[in-house]
Amino acid sequence: MLASLIVSLSMSYTLLRASDRSLAGTGLRHTSGRIVNGLSESKFSFGDGGETFTISEISDYEEGCGIGRNIWEASVALSCFLASYSESMGRTLEIGAGVGLVGHSIASNSSKARVVMTDHFAPLVDNLASSLLRNDLKATTALLDWREPELADAVASGSFDTVVGADVIYYYPDVKPIAAILQHLLAEAGGTAWIASPDYRAAEIGQALAATLRDKHGAIVDEEKYILVSEVGEIGDEAEQTETDKEDAIVHRRDFFGGAGNDSGGGEPEAGHSIFRVRFPAVAKG
Ligand SMILES: *[C@@H]1O[C@H](CO)[C@@H](O)[C@H](O)[C@H]1NC(C)=O
Ligand SMILES: *[C@@H]1O[C@H](CO)[C@@H](O)[C@H](O)[C@H]1NC(C)=O
C-alpha cells in the first residue's frame, strides 16, 4: 500500500540559511517516489515550468555499487542551492555522483554549464550514462577514483572551473585524497568547489576536510549551514489522501533519506546541511 501511496505524492524542497531562515534555494520538485524494497524512479523538476528529468536508483541486490545507489538528501540540498546560484559554473565536474541528482540538476537547470559526472563504481557510471541519454541531457560521465590521481588525469585533461560533491565525506581515510583531488582539478584555473554534507551524520568529518584543505592545500574554505525543508504536495487525483496518508509520507520520507530530519512544528521535516565553498587562488603564470 505504501508504494502506491508514495507514488501518488510529491515533495517540494526549499533551502533556508540556518542563521536567519532566509531563502537560499528553492524550486526543486520531486514527483514520484521510491517503490519500497525495490527499484525506484524519481522524477524531478525545477519550478513549474522546468524540464522534468528522471533519476533511477539501483536495487539493493545489484552488486558493486556501494552506497551511491540511492538518492541522498545532501544532493537535494546542493541541487536547490546551485539552482539559485547565479554565477556561471563553466566546466563542472561532480565527484561521487552516485545516481546523479546534482549533475542532472545542473545540466537541466543551467544551460551553459558543461558537466562531467564521475563515480568510483562502474555500474553507477553506466547507470548515469543511460540516465543522461534517457533524459536527453548534454553531460558526460567518467570513472574516477579519487585515490588514483592517474584516473583523474584521464578525466581532467585541462582543469575545471567548478567541482561539486554531495555527501562524499563520511570515511576518514578519504579526507586526504578528496582534498588532494580538489586541488588537482581546480587549482590551475583558480576554480571553486561546492561540497555538501549532512550535519546529522558528517559534521566532524566535514570540519576535518575543511582543515586539511586550508592547512595543507592553501585553499580558502567558507562554510555555511542550511536547513532543507520538504513540503508534501499532492499531484493528480490518483489516490484519495487523508492526513494520515500525509503523515505516513513524511515518516517514510525520513526513512527514504536515512533517518535525516525532524519535525519543524508545521508537520514538515527539516534537516541541517553544511555547504563548503572551497577556492584555490589562481596560480600566477611565468
Ligand atoms: C532553474 O531553477 C530555478 C529555481 O528553481 C528556476 O527558477 C528556473 O526556472 C530554473 N531554470 C531552468 C532552465 O530550469
Ligand atoms: C530540527 O532540525 C533543525 C535543522 O537541522 C534544527 O535546527 C533543530 O534544532 C532540530 N530540532 C530538533 C527538535 O531536533
Image (tube, grey):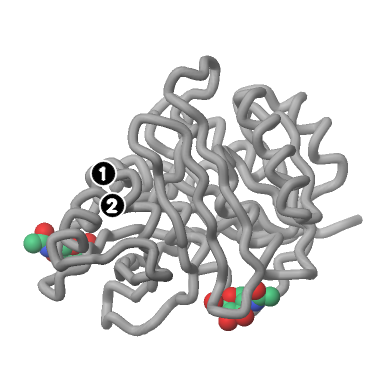
- Relative vertical location of residue 145 with respect to residue 29 in this rendering, above or below: above
* Residue, far right: 286
Along the viewing direction, whichever of 85 and 10 lies nearer the viewer: 10
Label 1: state its secondary structure. loop
Q: Amino acid at mark 2?
A: Arg
Q: Of circles 1 and 2, which is in front?
A: 1
Q: Residue sitting at 28 percent across and 72 percent down?
A: 18
Residue 240 seen in render: yes
* Residue, far top: 63
- Relative vertical location of residue 109 with respect to residue 148 in this rendering, above or below: below
Residue at the spot of label 2: 253
Residue at the spot of label 1: 1
| Quadrant assignment, res 46 | bottom right
Ligand 1 placement by image quarter: bottom right
Quadrant of the frame with the N terminus: top left
Q: CA distance from mark 1 to mark 2?
A: 15 Å
Confirm or deny contact between disc 1 and disc 2 (CB under 8 A).
no
Along the viewing direction, whichever of 49 and 68 lies nearer the viewer: 49
Q: Residue sitting at 24 percent across and 63 percent down?
A: 270
